[in-house]
Image: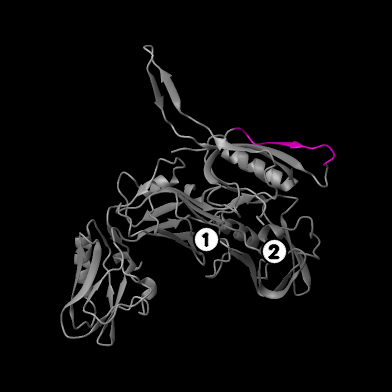
Amino acid sequence: MAEPKTPRWQHPNAIHRVATVLVPSSAQAAFPAENLKNPARGAALRTELGWTQKAGVRDKIDVIEGGVARVATLTPGTWATGAERAAQVTLDLNAMPGKVNTYFSGYSPTLKKFSIQRSSGGAPVTLPWATGANAANSGGADLGFDLTTDDTGALFYESDRRCYQGLHVIDVDFGPAEIQLDVIVGELDRIDFRRAGITYVANISGRRYTAPGDLTTAIAEAMQAADPGGGYAASWNAGVDNNQRFRITASFAFDLLWKTGANAGGRSIGALLGFDVNADDLAATTHVADAPVYGWPLVQALIAADHNLGFQGRIRVKGFSLDQVLVGTDHIRMAYPVTPEACQTLRITVDDVTNADGFLELASLYVGPYLELSQSLEVGYEEDYDSLDVVVVADHGSISSDNRGEPRRLNGSIGLLPRAERAALLALGRDLGLGHPFFFTGDPRNDPRGSTFYAVLREPIRTTHGPGDGDPPERWRARISLREDLP
């Protein structure tokens, strides 16, 4: 039985953030990576023709000579032709520490395949693509070799796949962490804490904090002012685990009285910092928040569209712990990570060596959160195509037509929305405005790729309230009208 069609609105796109920096392994001057920050579908990143080797990224070739393991490190660079790439591989193989043979790598312009062979020497040669010490970082796939099995028992090895280009890498840095926490004087501005049996109250300076470091400084100063002998400090995202949690420390064991303090449930800042305010944190020198406060975009959705990837092309996104392959074989590749993650940097790799274009072109890339409503579109919604064709009849009677495409169009209503979802949907609508494109997925569980398109709002989102639906339960109906944004 199919699951309900609860639509997802993919917005905002972290790639479009002003602070985001995109560093591709290569890019043509007329098609830089900055084009990916342009919401318009016509702007694209296009890599240089051929092969680009990035230092530290799939840059090893394991070789076994007469039972002795050797490792070749591939030199960074860009090569437009297979012959040029093979010539560099030859140099790198012959620079292997300790090697006793001489090697040659070639490229067949007819077969479009690389080869590696022993040109002199007496030691037997094995290429352990699957079992070598550097199998996880092997450059063999970029040369068309199958990494699931070793090549052994011969002196000449030819790649398994045609190869027209190498691996492409796009490194993404979202810039400094940003939060948006409003400390309101008289409402959410206090911390009740206790040390050595004495209870204190820290008053946090009221304002909007966007840099985590500013808020942790304010917390430490306020607690130190209330109890000068405590040696208090606060931090965010400390350590190497990317937990993005606030923590408060002191020179001595102390308690955070989130539940039993005088300001519990009223002016306590605990929930804003991610602490569980239903329990006190007791008798420790370090107290860590229970929930993260994200300083970078939460990656709930990954979408790549308007690209030239071939059938076998694969896009992979890696973050701190995130490791996700975008599935699909048509113009939309997408994934919803089972465990969403927020982190400062991502590495996107595109493996499409069999694509005869010889380069990567990518125009639409989404990385970020989504808003999913609890209700489906009501029965009777409209989904069709809006013809933009223009027919011109000349004065002398001839007829000509201008075919301008047929964008998808969706009109309908979503009813029974809770108040919180209504507020979130209206905020999204205000943020988007009319004409700003975003990825909309009408049926993310049953048909995610088929129901996803790059859309714009045709009219502002409006909500109406049904009679008798007061608080509780507060049921709202939203009217939506979308149109596909064409290149």
Structural crowding at the residue carrying mark 1, measured as other residues with C-alpha within 10 Å and reported as few (<14), some (14–19) or many (≥20): many
Residue 468 is one of the magenta-drawn residues: yes
Instruction: Please provide the residue range marked out in magenta.
Output: 459-469
Could you tell me the amino acid type at mark 1? Cys
Tell me: 51 left or right of 264.
left
Q: Quadrant of residue 147?
A: bottom left
Q: Residue at x 70, y 43 (%)?
A: 422
Q: Position of residue 31 (x, y in %)?
A: 34, 45
What is the image's colouring?
A: one colour
Q: Give the residue pinned by disc 2.
A: 275
Residue placed furthest toward the top: 395
Q: Is residue 49 above or below residue 42?
A: below
Secondary structure under the numbered disc 2 in the rendered image = loop
Q: Give the residue pinned by disc 1.
A: 343
Could you tell me the amino acid type at mark 2? Phe
**Tag 2 or tag 1, which sits nearer the N-term?**
2
Count of number-bearing discs: 2
Q: Main secondary structure of the magenta part?
A: loop
Tell me: 465 left or right of 28.
right
Q: Position of residue 434 (x, y in %)?
A: 56, 34
Q: Position of residue 411 (x, y in %)?
A: 62, 36
Quarter of the image with the N terminus is bottom right
Badge nearest the viewer, 1 or 2: 1
Q: Residue at x 45, y 40 (%)?
A: 40
Residue 483 is one of the magenta-drawn residues: no
